[in-house]
Amino acid sequence: MAHPQPQEQEVESPKISAYDAYFETVQSRKKLPGPLQENLTFAFSKVPVSAFQGVPGGKVIEIGADTCIADAVKVLSRHHILSAPVRNPEAEANSDWSDKYLGIVDYSAILLWVLETCRLSPSFCSATAAGVGGAGAMGAIGAVALGVTGPAAVAGLTAAAVCSAVAGTALAKIGEAKDSPTGVNNLSEDFDSIILQDEHFKSTTVRSILKSFRWAPFLPVGTDSSMLSVLLLLSKYRMRNVPVIEPGQPNIKNFITQSAVVHGLEGCKGMEWFDCIAAKSISDLGLPFMVSNEVISANINDPILEAFMKMRENEVGGLPVVEGTKKKIVGNVSISDIRYSLLKPELFSNFRNLSVKDFMSAISKNQGKAMSPITCNHQSSLGYVIETLASKSVHRIYVVDGEECQVVGVITLRDVISCFISEPPNHFDAYLGFAVKQIMKH
């Protein structure tokens, strides 16, 4: 007699549980009036992604999956961009985007690959630190990365559109607000000969580092999607950027980033709906959304390599640097700081033995100023936090307490975006079900 087979139960992904827990915490701590929150959410649901300005030149630059790292860096530099979608060379010309694109490669992924290679192969640090002028291949990549804040990105959060929706009137035409872009430095005349001589960069392909050194999946939205769906992906579901595609077309048209959204919010200053929220202290909004013992930090005497590995393991882009038992904040290190070590062969060659303190000192000397941490306190307004994040083009601000400046929290771009939205009933199933399934795979 055959026994009935047990039915397979759908198990909730730990990732989804974490996303839900984060967003539930946000919603429970926010103290916005119910009608205002509902109107804001409705407003964002009526802002179409199609209103965003297209990329310069009207075409998104792509990189083939089998391109070597050296050539990928050259493409990013030549087009003055920090990242690019990775094209699958095996896909047909008319393939769907899910077959055509394998992900997005950026300088962060390349730098993380460099770090991991350095950790596993000490000789890599010293070998690549030598070259023309002592810079070598590592110096060449550092030259590309220095001084970059990214390509122009439209924020898409127009005051007119949101204010009109909050007031219950017709949706106004969407304007635009951009990140403050800085062009990528041109490579030196020696770049081609330097970087192409290094076997690591010649033999390693973009495809090989794509999955291991990225923090989020490749997940585009259609131009007919709403800004609310995008904001939920950038906040609750922890996406750093959301590519935009046109329905029925396989190619990417644009990107929406967390940074662009916060820049857009900052541009809404002076509008009644924004000022009402921005005037509130961060504590009134439940910020920061973590308790002090959840803050991941680096001690000033820790090895710098350990600090960067901690960033990778916890999927964060930066850490506060603290000293003493009370965790007094004395600085900050971020993934992007790796680029400074790449320009200094004497620094990079000793990277495995360098302390956080020595690393910060070397960068301060290079910049000609101290690496002061960007902070606020519990009484700071949300408007101040947004203005600081936007004006300084940073991704996080640390919350400190008392005269000792003890780190008690971190406010990220993700947290700020979460303050302005809620998730309507059934929105997950209707608009984000497919997206979240893709996130669960990574």
Image (spheres, rainbow, N blue to C red):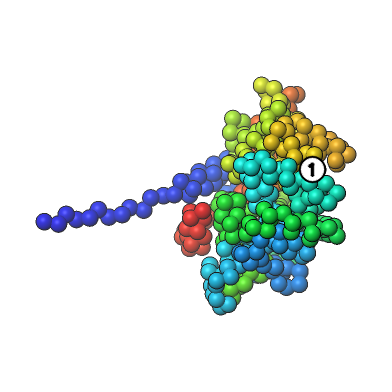
User: In this view, which residue lies farthest toward the right?
Assistant: 368
Q: Quadrant of the N terminus?
A: bottom left
Residue projecting furthest to the left: 1
Is 36 on the left or on the right of 182, as rendered? left
The relative height of residue 23 versus residue 186 in the rendered view (above or below) is above
At label 1, counting other C-alpha atoms closer than 10 Å, the crowd grade (few under 14, some 14-19, many 20 or more) is many
- Residue 339 placement (x, y as % from top left): 76, 47
Q: Position of residue 418 (x, y in %)?
A: 61, 49
Residue lying farthest to the top in this orientation: 325
What residue is rendered at 55% in x and 76% in y?
92
Name the residue tied to disc 1: 345
Q: Which sits in the foreground, 177 or 171?
A: 177
Examine the rendered structure and indicate whether residue 307 appears above or below residue 107. Answer: above
| Above or below, comparing residue 76 to residue 416 in the picture | below
Residue lying at 77% horizontally and 65% vertically, measured from the top left? 79
Of residue 260 and residue 72, the one placed in the foreground of this image is 72
Q: Amino acid at mark 1?
A: Pro
List x then y, in percent, for residue 164: 68, 62
Residue in the picture at 72% in, 29% down: 300
How far from the left and from the top, in percent, is residue 2?
14, 57
Query: Does residue 399 appear anywhere in the picture?
Result: no
> Where, by quadrant of the figure, is residue 118 drawn?
top right
Vertical placement of residue 68 versus 341, above or below: below
Give the secondary structure at mark 1.
helix
Residue lying furthest bottom = 94
Image position of 248 (left or right of 351): left
Query: Can you see residue 186?
Result: yes
Count of marks placed on residues = 1
Asked whether, in this view, residue 25 is left or right of residue 157, the answer is left
Near-viewer residue (258 or 226): 258
Q: Residue at x 36, y 53 (%)?
A: 10
